Image (cartoon, grey):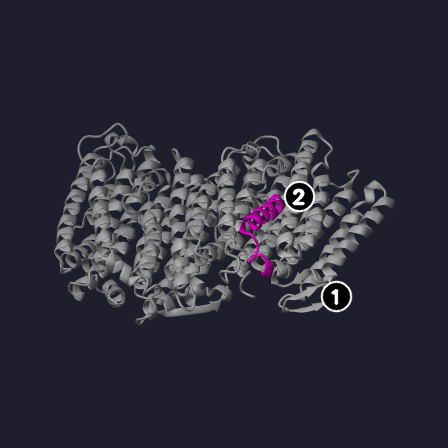
Amino acid sequence: MTMNENPADLLPELLVLGAAVLGLLTGIFLPRRRQWAVAVLCAAGLTAGLVAAAPPVGDPGVMVFGALMLDPITHAVRLTVLAATLLVVALAAGPLHGHARETELYVLVLLASLGTIVLAETSDLLVLVCAYLLASIPGYALAGFGKDARGTEASMKYFLMGALLGIVMLTGVTLLYGVAGGTSYRMLGEGLGQAPRGVVAVGVVALFAGVLFKAGGVPAHYWVPDVTEGAPPVVAAFVTTVPKVGALAAAFRLAQEALPGAAVDWRMFVAVVAAATMTLGNLAAFGQGNVRRLLAYSTISQAGYLLMPVAVAGRTDLAEPALLFYLAAYAVTNLGAFAVVVAWGSDDLADHAGLARRSPALALALVVCLLGLVGTPPTAVFVGKLLAFGAAIDGAYGWLAVLAAVNTVASVFYYLRWIVPVFGRAVPGRRPPGVWASAPACAAAVLSLALGVGGLTFR
Amino acid sequence: MTVLSAAIFLPLLAAAVLAVTPRVADRLVSWTWVAVCAVDLVLVAVMWAGHDGGVAYETRLTWMPSVGAGYHVGVDGLSLPLLALTAVLFLVCAVFSLGRTYRVRAFAALFLFLQTVCLGVFSALDLVLFFVFFDLSIVGMYFVIAGWGHGDNVRSALKFFLYTFVGSLALLLGFIALYLGAEPHTFDMVALTRDPPLADAPGPAALALLAVGIGLAVKTPVVPVHTWLPPAHTDAPAAGSAILAGILLKMGGYGLVRVAMPMLPQAWRAHAWLIVALGLVSVLYGSLVALAQENVKRLIAYTSVAHMGYIVLALGAAGTVAGDAAARRIAVTGAVTQMVSHGLITGALFLLAGVLYDRAQVYDMARYGGLARRAPVFAGLVIVAAFASLGLPGLSGFIAEFQILTGTIGGGTLWTAVAGALAVLGILITAGLFLRMLHRTLLGGPGPLTGRVTDVRAGELTAVAPLTALSLLIGIAPRPLLDMIEPASAAVVSLVSR
């Protein structure tokens, strides 16, 4: 593993940061009607970031600045987060056009996604905490973006929970630092073996509290439904998708680099959390009549499936591709489902009746995305689930794979509750959304299929 | 692109074209659908004519190399009869649906999609590919039942989806176990058949067989996981029922022959008694429950459970190594023949039930009577199909069931002989229930709804008659079909005896 301090290695991150800062400055001087220029600027920054992130894929792992790893995890998370954020910006451009705080939204989204990327690539506990804050604080502001009662409540819950679990996480960092004598994952990996088991156990659990908060895992999931329902739909799409990518990648990196030597059964801990997350998320989704709440609980259950590869990190070669592919698949598919909600403009499940008559393309996109979330082939999540199940069985967690399969079946029930009325009789008086409003949803659906059919062909 | 890939994806292409073309006349849509199915049948016929043993028309493309999965398709003596059945039955359904007026374009597109999926299952030589098609068949059929069914169709469709989805996920776990058990890890069915995975680990192999078995048993369906079938059939449109019973159920039996037996031979042999018992229970329970039905469609649905039970029985008996290899070959040949025969006969019966529903919107036998006088051609078709189903010599059901029972009874052990003898009772019950159905609907005085039943129309006749004719053809001249199946079933028997 070579060390270097070349800023060009962080070009994608710098481009996103530059776009955010430049966007903020430009937005201050632009009249309200022309703030769309900031959207274009941010999209350009993200695209440039994607272009810059592509060439290093496949390079051997390097550590830069002593704290950031450039390895397959980082490359995959960069591409996923940047592409997903680009989709969110495209999704926001329509509904937010001419909004008084249009610029702020784009800038906050970019900063949160920057924090997410750092969360995934750091290999040092202190940088992990900083990245946690960078990924979270813009999120709190975004949740209250609408300045309405529900949004404020959501933002408050999000903030309080984030602050509390952030402190818990910091406590965990302190404990692990104390017993391992360092904060870098490499030192943790060497030091935790001899450390007192009780302290390590408390430290690891406390550390995971923060990670689970960002990932929306049980028991740190309480903010998810409120934020998803209370915040503007675009924000809901963002905060349930993008930070999760970084958090789960961070959990995986922790598991792979820092914990293998620890004398505590952290695998079982993660497996139990995964089991609880997927089961609780699914059970809570059953009775929802509001599609955004339904999607909120669905994202919780997806976090449970995504924790499976974390539990078997380092034990099987399938774990890493499983997590990375599933993350990309989940991001695209989940955003697609939210994009349909944004385009159709209604949260009520009953209001989706007859969507197929009004807008066949949007209905098809919804079917692809929802069945995609179930894991129906040939969508991307199917490949992700295939790999994740394989990783769990290979890593001697067969029971977790069986539980995940049972949960998947249960999830079909509530996804179908949404699909069925779409093909039924139309609610009178609703106009079909425009072509441009449906475009992000269709793009996400196509991407989900393309990723499923061709995603693993060229690796 | 080989002729096989063309045959698989031609319907999907047509479906996509139909889906995106705006404002096409219904008649044009229907005739395009028929034409595509006809071309597809010709392609399958070309493959049949050109097949000279072994795996032919193979295509192997890289897809997901990192997990050892690929686009690998090919046909042999096990898959070709089922491909032919698929092509025939889908063409027949297209013809049968010619006069439809309700959302024709979506209906045709969905059926064409389903056709690709079914052809894909029967030609896949990679477990992931097999699973992709297997799972998509559930999605396609769900929309057929939910969108075009009647009665309590949304509920039945949901039950169908959830039930069979449980099965397909169990199947997926089993496939993953096979993948992880193979060295090097692979999903390629040819490689897995050559070197059976988990050969030196009986415990995991039994678990893998359990997972694969549950998945395929739900689809087949085997008692006690058959309860999704009657409501799904009752509330599905006629063409949907025909495809569901004729093709989708075969995926279960085909999976047993193609995946479970050759890839887990030791586990299959060790649990052969259980498989035989499940098959026997399906035969007896299915036919007894069918005997008690008043609803024509439910009756046919339960006879399907019984008929598929024979397949499971025969395949289980083929796992008893104690006996005669020739008898086991006959059993497997009979099982594959039964798949084809049941597809033709049940397809015909469900389409005929659809004719009845089209006229009077009721499936209740008690409301009809004396239909033979009112609709003689309809009655003739029902009689031929019913006799074929109960296994009358000269029709395909006899060829299949005779071989199954011969192979099972001659399997060489006492308990297979007893099981085979008990299964003969199933034929007796089936004969009784079909005669009772014929008696109550076709003969006797007219019932309250008899007046509404008109005879079959030209389109309906054109659809159903080829199915009964093919059943008759197989019954009289089974050699071409058996010549296709026998080498493949001999191969399966030698693989399972390893």
Q: Position of residue A69 (x, y in %)?
A: 66, 62
Residue identified by numbered label 1: A5
State the image quarter where residue B188 is shown: bottom left
Q: Position of residue A360 (x, y in %)?
A: 56, 43
How many residues crowd around disc 2 within 10 Å: few (fewer than 14), some, or many (20 or more)? many
**Inter-mark Cα distance, 1 to 2:** 29 Å
Query: Is residue B166 or residue A363 the one in the foreground?
Result: B166
First in sequence: mark 1 vs mark 2: 1
The secondary structure type at the circle numbered 1 is: loop
Q: Position of residue A116 (x, y in %)?
A: 67, 51
Q: Position of residue A127 (x, y in %)?
A: 70, 54
Q: Residue at x 52, y 60 (%)?
A: A314
> Where, quadrant-wise, is the N terminus of chain A in this rendering?
bottom right
Chain of the residue under label 1:
A
Residue identified by numbered label 2: A166
Question: On the picture, is B432 further left or further right than B228?
Answer: left
Q: Amino acid at mark 1?
A: Glu
Chain of the residue under label 2:
A
* Magenta segment boundaries in residue numbering: A190-214
